[in-house]
Structures are given as C-alpha cells and as structure tokens.
Amino acid sequence: MLCSWRAQPDDAGRLSMFDQKLRPVLRPNALYYLRVLALSTVMLWMPMCLFFGAVFRRSEYIYRTDIEIVDLDQGPVGRQISQSALLLAAAAPDQQAQPRWRIRNDLTTLAATREWVRHHGWAALVINSGASDRLAAAVSGNSNTAYNPNDAATLIFNTGRHPIIELSYIQPALTTIARKAQMEFSEGFTRQLQGSGQISAIPAQNIVTLATQPVAFRIVDAAPLSFAIAPIVYLFSFLVGQLCVIGTLIAWKMASFSFFLKAKHTHVWLGAVTVVLVWSTYIGMLSALAISAFRGPSYSRFALPYTVGRFFSLWFTTAMVLSAGGMWLMSWFMILTPELLALASLSLILPNVASTLTAVETAPRFFRWFYALPFYNGSMLYRYILSGGFPRIGLNVGVVLGELCAWIVILWLTTLVRQYTVIRGTSDVPGWYRGHIFFASPVPYYKDEKIEPEPEAEPFEEGTISITDSADDTTSLNEGNLGV
C-alpha cells in the first residue's frame, strides 16, 4: 500500500519539467552534463590508450629479450647444436617476434648458468659438459651403462622474471629452436652411423636410442612461477586493494570538512597520512592472508615454501604499494572537484595495471616511465618473494618508498590549499568551487563578510548627587566607602 500511487505526495503546485519557469535551471544543468560527457570520454580514452598501447603490440618487441647459448661441452655435439640453433633463429620469418640468441662463454658450470639466468636472464640453452664424450662412449661400446640422451642438453627458463612473457614468448621460442636443432643433429648423426658402418658395434641397450634420438634435453625452471595463479596474483592483490583504498579516501574527504574549519593544518595533514597508511596496511594484511590460504606450503612442489617471512614480506610489499598509490589519490582528491576524481583514479589504475601485464622491455620506448610505477616495482618484489627470480630488491623498494615520501610532501601542500579554500568559503563539502552550479558551502564567502560598527556609548547626563545621609555611613567619604 505504501507503494500505491494514492500514497504519493500531492503534485498540486508542482511545476512540469516543460514549464517555462524551469528553463533558467534546466539550461545550465544540461550544459554541465554535456561537459561531463565530453570529460568522461577523455578520461576513458586517455588511460585506455596507454593501457592498450603498452600491451597490444608487445609481440613486435620480443627481440629486446635474449636467450643465451652456453656450450659447456666444447666438443662436436656442443658446436653442432650451438651453430644449428643460431642458424635456425636467424632463419625465422619474423625476427622482431623472436628473442635474440647470444652465445656466452663466461659461464663454466650448469649451476652457475642456472644462477645467472635466475638473477639476470630470460632463458638459456645449455649443452652439458661431457655430452660429446658420453655419446662417443655409447657408440664405441666403452660404456657399461645405458645411454641417456637427456643428459646432452638443458633448457633453463626463468618464469619468475615475468610469467606472462616467459610462458607466451620465451618458452615457445626456446623449445621450438631446441627441438629443431635436436632433429637436425639426430638426422645427421643417423646418416653418419649408417655410412660408417658403426651400427653393428653399438651395444643392444643403446642402439634404439642412438638410432632415433641421440640427443635430447631436460627442462629446468630457475625460478618457478608458472603455476596457474602466479601471473595475476600480484595484479589482483594490488588492483582490489587500491579500489578499496579509493572508497575510503573519498569518504574521508567528505567527512573531513569540519576538521579543516577547526583543526590545525598539520594535524589535518597527519590525519590524512594516517588514514592512508593504516588502511593500506590493513588491506595488505588481508591480501597476504588470502595468498597463504589458497597457496600454502603444499600448493606446488615447484614453488618456494610459503614461510612466515614470506607472509610478512608480501604483507608489507602490498601495504607499501597501496600507500604510495593512496598518497597519490589523496593528494589529488584534496583539490579536485567530484567530477574529476575518476580521472585521478583511472590515471593511477590503468597504467599501473598495464605495467604488470607486460614487461617494459616488450613495450614501446615511450613506456619506459613504467619503471617508476608502484605496481611495477611491487610486482617485481612479489615475483622475487614467491620464486626468487630476478632480484632487484633495493631498487624496487627504493623507488616505491621514494614515491611514497614525495607524495606525502605533496599531500601537505594540497591539504593546505584545501583548508585555505574551505575557510574562505570558496570550496564546499564535496569539493565544488565557488561559481559552480552545485556549489553550496555552509561557510560565508570571505568577501561577503561585513564588519558591523560597534554601538556608540550613551552620553553621560550631567546632574548632582545627593549625599545628605552621609552622617549615617560607617566610613567617611575620604576613605572611599559610601556604605556599600
């Protein structure tokens, strides 16, 4: 019954929206919303262009990544596979869509190569030490053990550097070239055996292997981070956490109007900084708890164990990244009108998201400024904590903390501007400025304040005072007490 049209307020005396009297109100509102529509278009297209520009054509910049060829064998097998891999890579139809292949001679062991890839590289094709000797022994029959072709070569990946780029481009390129080089070597080796008549001398336990697959390779991940949740775990943590922080900051701006009127500027500034830091730290704890709940020590046998130290590392990494982004947002929220809050949010979120979805090496050179973004440095810290790959701890922490400190200083300036405009009556609770159609500040405009003149004192009337009863006073007139 409450929803019945009979229960609605009486429309008697209300104006129709087509009434001529409403035109002075409707016209400026309509023009305002047209401006908002144009502004929203710009706010959407600018960050989206940045996002798609960074990730759309990254396959054309894969040539900026490197795959190392390390010949630890220094024999016929090593030389032939190395040269075959280089020639096959050079013959690829689209060179820009292929990683660069380089020969390295400064790595002397498989363990050293693996550590170098984990710290600095993308991937490596390693011809293992003694591969030629083991193959020759298997052909001559001097070896009493069965020949294992997988001991000939090792493919080393580093998914901890960037899982998406590694899984999408590096691994396919390396495995394709390695298999083609393996097939070329096997075909040539088989023809050599048949032409030399050595097949009859090969032990029975090795003849099938040597005739079909004399060399093969093992696959090693120097910093495993290729399980399903890895490519998006840090992005999801930062994105959801930052969205939660945005809502809190908008609410704080709306509720802090009276603080600007009554509190000191320094205290208001410290209050804003405290809100960002405390809320970001809380969201960071929730993120680390979620990862520990769904990942845990037994999530994958390839993953590093999820220890207490890694839990706190993820917690404070997330808190640090969200705090840097939160200070950026709070600084802009202080001085922007409500219609521009989305611009500040999108300008922060979309470029940061793009920086985690692609490696900066595979983006156009214009996007080199991604190196300074909080999400980018936080994602590198996440990948190192979870896999141990591509450690740049000092650089990443330094960049994020530097941004955090810089935006704390900028927030001091914007809170000063906000308090100045609030006290002078030129900015209202939501942040509209004087002259806007929605402006409605409870504080009088400072130029409209009129100083009322003080009332003049009433003139003193002359007359005489009768003291005929002075004889009854307990104290004389000379002592100044008239019996009061």
Image: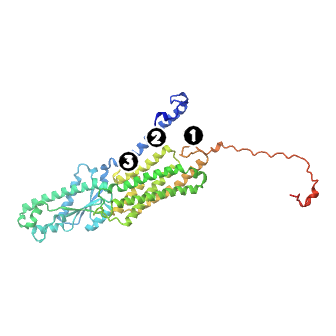
Q: Secondary structure at mark 2?
A: helix
Please name the amino acid that badge 1 sits on: Gly
**Residue at label 1?**
435
Q: Position of residue 110 (x, y in %)?
A: 25, 67
Give the Cα distance between marks 3 and 2: 19 Å
Q: Position of residue 464 (x, y in %)?
A: 92, 49
Instruction: Name which of mark 1 and mark 3 comes first in the sequence.
Output: 3
Label 3, secondary structure: give it. Answer: helix
Foreground mark, 1 or 3? 1
Q: CA distance from mark 1 to mark 3?
A: 35 Å
Residue 39 shows which numbered tag?
2
User: Please, what is the three-letter code of the amino acid marked with disc 2?
Assistant: Leu
- N-term-proximal mark, 1 vs 2: 2
Front residue (pair 99, 226) = 226
Q: CA distance from mark 1 to mark 2?
A: 19 Å
The three-letter code of the residue at mark 3 reads Phe
Colour scheme of the rendered structure: rainbow
Q: Which residue is mark 3?
A: 51
